[in-house]
Image (tube, rainbow, N blue to C red):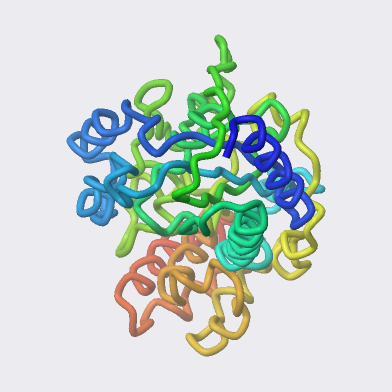
């Protein structure tokens, strides 16, 4: 197909993407990220991936998307806005409640985005055939495959990787998911985005655990999102007080970014915070057994980490709450069948007993 016609086809594709609910579409080639292998190797060599062994196991694919599927000629990068309609940091002022990352306060984005990607991919195949082209092959990816989404998104012009290593867009800020469609169709590409962080250090300076060894570098072993989601077993005792009441993920570095002044609240109702997850009671969350946990978090990304890891996080938050009223909650879990939960409960008790004793003396 002539270049002009392909430009027109791409325009129709973008229009359909927006009609489906995506906030933006841009295109690059699978091989447009030559810097990724060296950066990934340095990240792994430093041990910054912590317990995420799958990053090392599949680094040959993650470092070179063209190896993942050699027949692909284009990567269509899609953005989906999940911007909050509230201050995501407001929960820090309520230590007897849990703070859950904005993206996890409702439905699992993997399911929502993948359905939209598949819908758009089907439309693209049908539209290509109607335009007289051979039916293109497609593969859709959302976060769970060994695909370097953020570098590809920057190569496609969707945004740039900020000093916190997350993607930032001049139009969307930081509050958006990424999905991609790899295809054998050779679409016109968009130019790569350049860095617009300048001298700003807001995201680096706000990090509670100093998880950034340097701008554009992340040591996941100190990142609260990693510690509360990916890390299994007890969290380092020195890091537990720094978690505050963050029980699933952390939005501090995203929320601090001044580019979010251009962000808009999500229009998709499935991303609007559930009332029960906006500021949930730590006492109620700590009481969840496995069945109750699964029922409460049905359809949520939080369900993936399981009851034990989640209650561990809740107990760290209880220990950080400074609330004598929560002492009995922690005491009731000191003999939990899960050793990590029991350890977290005993730590919380050690933090709250002095508070309770001080209140009794007064």
Residue 306: image x %, image y %?
Answer: 44, 75
> Furthest-left residue in view?
45
Q: Closer to the camera, 32 or 132? A: 132
x 55%, y 34%: residue: 167
Q: Look at the picture and state if 202 lies above or below 230.
A: above
Residue 96 appearing in the image: no
Q: Quadrant of residue 157?
A: top right
> Furthest-bottom residue in view?
291
Badge count: 0
Q: Quadrant of residue 233?
A: bottom left
Residue 43 appears left or right of 93: left
Q: Look at the picture and state if 93 lies above or below 6.
A: below
Q: Closer to the camera, 23 or 110? A: 23
x 54%, y 38%: residue: 187
Residue 201: image x %, image y %?
Answer: 54, 18
Residue 266 appearing in the image: yes
x 29%, y 54%: residue: 52
Image quarter (top left, top right, bottom left or bottom right) of the N terminus:
top right
Residue 249: image x %, image y %?
Answer: 52, 53
x 70%, y 53%: residue: 94
Residue 317 appears left or right of 50: right
Residue 13: image x %, image y %?
Answer: 68, 47
Q: Look at the picture and state if 168 lies above or below 148.
A: above
Q: Closer to the camera, 83 or 70? A: 70
Q: Look at the picture and state if 195 lies above or below 3.
A: above
Image quarter (top left, top right, bottom left or bottom right) of the C terminus:
bottom right
Q: Quadrant of residue 299?
A: bottom right
Q: Closer to the camera, 144 or 141? A: 141
């Amino acid at each position: 197909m002539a270049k002009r016609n392909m430009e027109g086809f791409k325009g129709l594709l973008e229009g359909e993407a927006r009609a489906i609910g995506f906030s933006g579409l841009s295109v690059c080639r699978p091989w447009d990220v030559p810097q990724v292998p060296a950066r990934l190797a340095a990240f792994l060599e430093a041990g910054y991936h912590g317990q995420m062994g799958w990053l090392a196991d599949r680094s040959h694919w993650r470092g070179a998307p063209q190896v993942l599927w050699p027949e692909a000629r284009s990567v269509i990068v899609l953005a989906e806005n999940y911007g909050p309609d509230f201050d995501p940091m407001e929960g820090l002022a309520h230590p007897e409640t849990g703070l859950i990352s904005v993206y996890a306060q409702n439905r699992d984005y993997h399911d929502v985005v993948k359905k939209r990607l598949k819908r758009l991919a089907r439309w693209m195949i049908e539209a290509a055939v109607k335009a007289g082209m051979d039916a293109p092959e497609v593969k859709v990816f959302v976060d769970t495959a060994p695909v370097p989404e953020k570098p590809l998104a920057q190569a496609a012009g969707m945004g740039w990787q900020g000093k916190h290593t997350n993607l930032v867009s001049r139009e969307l800020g930081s509050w958006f998911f990424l999905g991609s469609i790899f295809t054998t169709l050779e679409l016109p590409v968009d130019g790569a985005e350049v860095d617009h962080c300048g001298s700003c250090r807001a995201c680096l300076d706000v990090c509670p655990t100093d998880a950034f060894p340097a701008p554009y570098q992340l040591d996941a072993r100190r990142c609260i999102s990693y510690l509360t989601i990916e890390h299994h077993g007890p969290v380092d005792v020195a890091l537990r007080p720094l978690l505050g009441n963050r029980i699933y993920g952390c939005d501090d570095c995203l929320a601090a970014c001044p580019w979010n002044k251009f962000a808009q609240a999500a229009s998709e109702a499935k991303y609007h915070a559930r009332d029960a997850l906006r500021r949930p009671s730590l006492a109620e969350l700590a009481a969840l057994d496995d069945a109750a946990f699964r029922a409460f978090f049905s359809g949520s990304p939080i369900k993936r980490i399981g009851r034990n890891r989640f209650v561990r996080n809740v107990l760290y938050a209880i220990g950080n709450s400074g609330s004598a009223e929560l002492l009995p909650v922690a005491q009731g879990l000191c003999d939990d069948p899960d050793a990590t939960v029991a350890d977290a409960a005993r730590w919380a008790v050690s933090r709250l007993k002095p508070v309770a004793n001080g209140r009794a003396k007064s």
